[in-house]
Amino acid sequence: MTKLPKYTLSHDQKREDWKLTNDATGRVAKRFETKADGTARGALRKAVGPEGASVRIEKEKGGYQEERTYPKNRDPKKTPG
């Protein structure tokens, strides 16, 4: 199995929105007005595309809240959660 691309959903203090950044390239893949917009109704799944990815979701003030894998069947079985 190939490694999944990694993305991070984080708060952008300058623009007062949330950005989904490709960790390998540093490029912003998608912007969301609120964190809820980014995590609701499959928005992250659509943003990372059909090949899937691992997305770390940050808290607004720093630190990580959770990590999600898209599609779910590509979630590594060796890690808890």
Image (spheres, grey):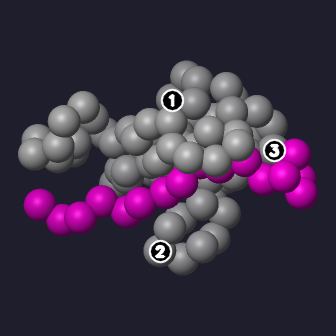
Q: Residue at x 69, y 33 (%)?
A: 35
| Apparent side of residue 1 relative to residue 19 in the rendered image (left or right) | left
Q: How many marks?
A: 3
Q: Is residue 42 magenta?
A: no
Q: CA distance from mark 1 to mark 2?
A: 22 Å
Marks 3 and 2: in contact by CB < 8 Å?
A: no
Q: Which amino acid, mark 2?
A: Ala
Question: 8 or 43, which is in the foreground?
Answer: 8
Mark earlier in primary sequence (2, 3): 3
Q: Which amino acid, mark 1?
A: Gly
Q: Residue at x 64, y 47 (%)?
A: 62
Q: Which mark is residue 42?
A: 1
Circle 3 residues within 10 Å: few <14, some 14–19, many ≥20 = some
Q: Which amino acid, mark 3?
A: Asp
Q: CA distance from mark 1 to mark 3?
A: 18 Å
Q: Which of labels 1 and 2 is toward the front?
A: 2
Q: Secondary structure at mark 3?
A: strand
Q: Secondary structure at mark 2?
A: loop
Q: Is residue 62 above or below residue 35?
A: below
Please give the residue where the numbered disc 3 appears in the rendered image.
Answer: 17
The image quadrant of residue 29 is bottom right
Mark earlier in primary sequence (1, 3): 3
Circle 2 residues within 10 Å: few <14, some 14–19, many ≥20 = few
Q: CA distance from mark 2 to mark 3?
A: 21 Å
Please give the residue where the numbered disc 2 appears in the rendered image.
Answer: 24
Q: Quadrant of the C terminus?
A: top left
| Residue 16 percent coordinates (x, y) | 87, 46
| Residue 77 percent coordinates (x, y) | 11, 41
| Apparent side of residue 2 relative to residue 18 in the rendered image (left or right) | left
Q: Which residues are magenta?
A: 1-16
